[in-house]
Amino acid sequence: MTLPALRDFGRNAVDPGHYQALGRDWFLAVADVVASTDLAGQGRDRDVNFVAGAAVAVLTRVGTKPPDVTACQFGGDGAIAAVAPDCAAAARAALAALAHWASVEIGVPLRVGLVPVAALADAGHDVRAALQDFGNGNVFGQFLGDGVLAADSWVKADARWRIDPAPGELPGIEGLSCRWQPVPAARGRVMCVIVDPAPGERGRAALERLNDALEGIVPGMTAAPLGDGARLAPKGVPGRRALAVEMRVVPRGRRLLRLFAAIGGMLILKAVHALGGKVGGVDADRYRRELARRSDYRKFAGGPRFVLDVTDAEAEAIETLLAREEAGGAIRFGTSRADSTTITCLVGDFAADRHIHFVDGDGLGFWRAASAMKAKRRPN
C-alpha cells in the first residue's frame, strides 16, 4: 500500500481525507526510552534523542519494502512507525536488536513493541497514516486517529505487546549523527507542544479549530525553530560526547574510521561555509537551507507535536488557547520551554541529497511537555 503524500502541511495535516486508514493486517511499531527522568537528570538528553533517532533510522528501513516508503515518526524519547504485513517479522527482529544495542552500546534502556492494527480496531481505535513529502525520498510519517496513542500505552502497560532485546542487524543506523550544537531561539523561546484530542468527532473538530487558531497566533513558517537555515553556522569539530555516541552506530573495528569521517565532514562543511557557501560539489548553503526545511518541527501523532520558536506573548496565547480547549474536554495538552533546539540528523546519501532531521527542545522538550500533560491526571 502506497501512503498518500502531504505536500501542504498547514492545509492538509488535520484532514482525514489526506490520510490512508491502515488495514487490519498492518502493525504499529513502538519504541520508547525507559527512565527518561533519570537520564535527563544525568544530562544525557542528547543520548535519549540519539536513540529515538536510531529507532526512526531502523524502522524506516524495515517497515515497508521498496518502492513503498515507511511512515515513521521521531518523538524525542521514542518513535512510532506503520509496518506493512509482509514486514512484521523483519520489524520484530530489528526492534529486538535496537533495544539490545541501545542498552549495551548507549546505556539507554529502550522498550519496544509491535501492536496489530486489527487488535486496535477491535478495541475501537482508528489508525490513519500519511507521508509529509519533501521530494527525493525525504519523508516524515504523519498519523491521525487515536490508534497511535493506544499502541504506545499498550506497549507500556502490557508485556504481551513488548519484544525482548536480542542481538541482531540494525539496517539504516549508520546514517545517524548528532554533530550540530543546539540552535538558540531567534524569537524568544523554543516551545514544545503536545496535544491529544478527545476520541471521535469532538476531538477531530478541536484539531481543526486549533490548526486554524495556531496559524493565527504564529504562522508555522514563522515559528520554524531553524528558520531558513541561515543561522546554522557549522562549528567545525563536533563535541566529544556527540562523537562518542555516533561511533556506536558502526562495529568496533570501524569506529576510528567513522571518527575521522565525522570530524572531516564537519570541517569541510565549515570551510566551504567560510569560503562563500559553495566549493566544487559541496554546497554548504543549500545543505543548511534543506536541513531547516526538512526538520520535523510540525507533526501529528493523533494530535499535534510541535517545536516552535515563539515570542513570550505568542507562547502565552498558545497556552491560553489550549487551556480553553482542555477545559471544554476536547483535548489534553502539555507544553515546555527551552532556550534552544537540538538536532539529530539522518543522512541516507549526502551526495544524492537524501537527508532528514529531527528536532526537540533542548533538555528533552517533548518529554517534559508529555510529563506536564501526565501530571494533570495525577490526584492531588
Image: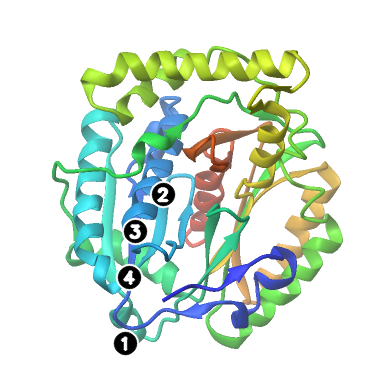
- Residue 108 in the image, given as x and y percentages of width and height: 30, 35
**Mark 4 to mark 2 CA distance (whole Å):** 15 Å
Secondary structure at numbered mark 1: helix
Which residue is found at the position 61% from the left and 27% from the top? 182
Q: Nearer the viewer, residue 200 or 293?
A: 293
| For the residues bearing labels 1 and 2, Cβ distance under 8 angstroms | no
Q: Choose mark 2 or mark 3, whichever is in front.
A: 2
- The amino acid sitting under disc 3 is Val
For label 3, the residue is 30
- The amino acid sitting under disc 1 is Asp
Tag shown at residue 84: 4
**Mark 1 to mark 3 CA distance (whole Å):** 19 Å
Q: Earlier in the sequence, mark 1 or mark 4?
A: 4
- Residue 107 in the image, given as x and y percentages of width and height: 27, 30
**Mark 3 to mark 4 CA distance (whole Å):** 14 Å
| For the residues bearing labels 4 and 2, Cβ distance under 8 angstroms | no
Q: Earlier in the sequence, mark 1 or mark 3?
A: 3
Residue 305 visible in this rendered orientation of the protein:
no
- The amino acid sitting under disc 4 is Ala
Q: Choose mark 1 or mark 4, whichever is in front.
A: 4
Q: Nearer the viewer, residue 15 or 258?
A: 258
Q: Is residue 58 above or below residue 249?
A: below
Secondary structure at numbered mark 3: strand
Q: Residues within 10 Å of mark 2 (few under 14, many from 20)?
A: many
